[in-house]
Image (cartoon, rainbow, N blue to C red):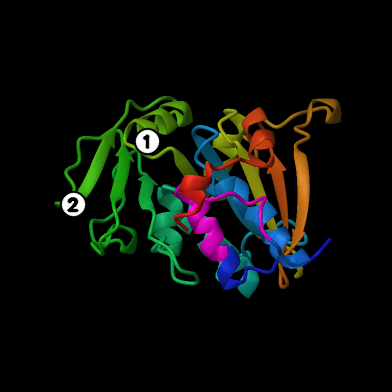
Amino acid sequence: MHCVDVTPRVWERLLAVRHGAACTCCGRWSAGERAALDLYGPLARRDVGPMTVAQIGQSLDGRVATVTGDARDVSGPDGLAHLHRMRALVDGVVIGVRTALHDTPRLTVRLCNGRHPTRVVIDPKGRLPDDAPVLKRDGARSIVVQAVDRPRPDGVEVIRLKARDTGLDPVEIVSALNDAGLSSLLVEGGGITISRFLEAGLLTRLQVAIAPLLIGGGPQGLTMPSPTERLSDAIRPDTRVFPLGSDVVFDCGLTEAAMIATQPVHVPEARASQV
């Protein structure tokens, strides 16, 4: 395994892939650059249909925070840069309201070049305050998915869905976001939200970034609503491993589309010559 090396020319190529103007297979690349293209290429592609990928950063012992809730430094610097690259390559980033309230994220792209994604908060009961950082008016699109008739400030879009016994239906959420023009989604947190999308069979890929630290207690990364009782029934994804430097990413393909996305894509010469 070669450590992922996201050089400026690699990132330029990936942004071109995102816009359908280049491929990840052609060119002369170092081993580290090729690893970067292999890791991020499937996220950048738009020719394989709608995609929903989730990412979670955790410790060696599977924790995402301490017992007091401190989660700020679970991922190392390379893990954080990886997350920002993922944001830059997707159309929208999805989080649950608990993550929005506790971590007060901005969900912007700051550690690499690229546009801010559309920011989506799943907020069934309308608990998110209107001055939350994730709703800040900075040119990026913001969407709140909720079940209540709660008005939002100008510039914040509202998707109203019917509440179920277990909250909002992940299938309906993804369908509504796709209809809103977001075909490529990153479910960034928290662990409960990611687990619900995973159990619903909605994830194309799951990336688990492991940082080399032991926390010893605190919330776990993924806890399925209906965990399997037998190992023979456990999810066994097609998994690739990528060293980032401070962290290691396990890239898990969960659908046929995920497998297709790792294969070379041909871009007509007329379009490729534009980059």
SS type, badge 2: loop
Relative horizontal placement of residue 29, taking residue 257 as reference (left or right)? right
Q: Residue 195 sits in which quadrant?
A: top right
Q: Which residue is mark 1?
A: 177
**Compared with residue 222, is residue 34 higher up or lower down, i.e. above or below?**
below
Which circle's residue, 2 or 1, is located before the other in the chain?
2
Q: Which residues are magenta?
A: 11-27
Instruction: For residue 95, say whether it is visible.
Output: no
Task: Inspect the image, locate mark 1, and give the three-letter code of the amino acid beneath it.
Answer: Leu
Q: Residue at x 67, y 28 (%)?
A: 256
Q: Alpha-carbon neighbours of circle 1 within 10 Å: few (<14), some, or many (≥20)?
A: some
Q: Alpha-carbon neighbours of circle 2 within 10 Å: few (<14), some, or many (≥20)?
A: some
Task: Inspect the image, locate mark 2, and give the three-letter code of the amino acid beneath it.
Answer: Gly
Residue 155 — which label?
2
Instruction: For residue 10, say whether it is visible.
Output: yes
> Considering depth in this image, is 224 or 56 the residue closer to the camera?
56
